Image: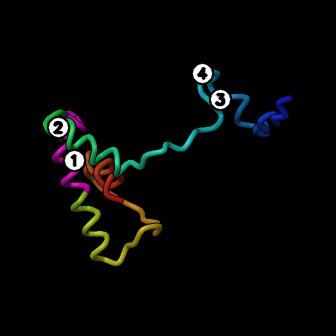
Amino acid sequence: MHNAQAPTAMPERVHHRFWPKRLPHTLRVPQNSLWFNLEVNARRYPDKPALIFFDRSLNHRELHAQAERVAAHLQAHGVRAGDRTTQTSRCRSAPPICRAGC
């Protein structure tokens, strides 16, 4: 006989009453990191658009290269894996590049 425990339900939170019905209350953490997916896409689709912002476009190769530059800059200034960082920018296309580089 199979003796499996039922999954524990997440406690109801006040904001869940207003939460859209089509959206889950929890998220599953992906198996692959953003950096891993960025590298894979840069190899598979180097010339396909990765980011489009108004009239500007970055392909996967360019996005990967810029994210590597951000990561190198952070490392050069003492930021290590696990450190928390923050970012400010006037350029609206910069946040995804900086997130990828962190």
**Is 46 covered by the magenta stretch?**
no
Which mark's residue is nearer the viewer, 1 or 3? 1
Residue drawn at (48%, 44%), measured in percent from left and top? 31
Residue drawn at (29%, 63%), measured in percent from left and top? 71
Q: Nearer the viewer, residue 12 or 44?
A: 44
Which mark's residue is nearer the viewer, 3 or 4? 4
Crowding around mark 3 (Cα neighbors within 10 Å: few <14, some 14 to 19, many 20+) is few
Regarding mark 1 in the picture, which secondary structure is present there? helix
Question: Residue beneath label 2, please?
Answer: 57
Contact (CB < 8 A) between labels 3 and 4?
no
Crowding around mark 4 (Cα neighbors within 10 Å: few <14, some 14 to 19, many 20+) is few
Crowding around mark 1 (Cα neighbors within 10 Å: few <14, some 14 to 19, many 20+) is many
Q: Which residues are magenta?
A: 49-67
Q: Earlier in the sequence, mark 3 or mark 2?
A: 3
Report x, y in % for residue 100.
33, 52
Mark 1 → mark 3, Cα distance in angstroms: 34 Å
Question: Residue beneath label 1, please?
Answer: 63
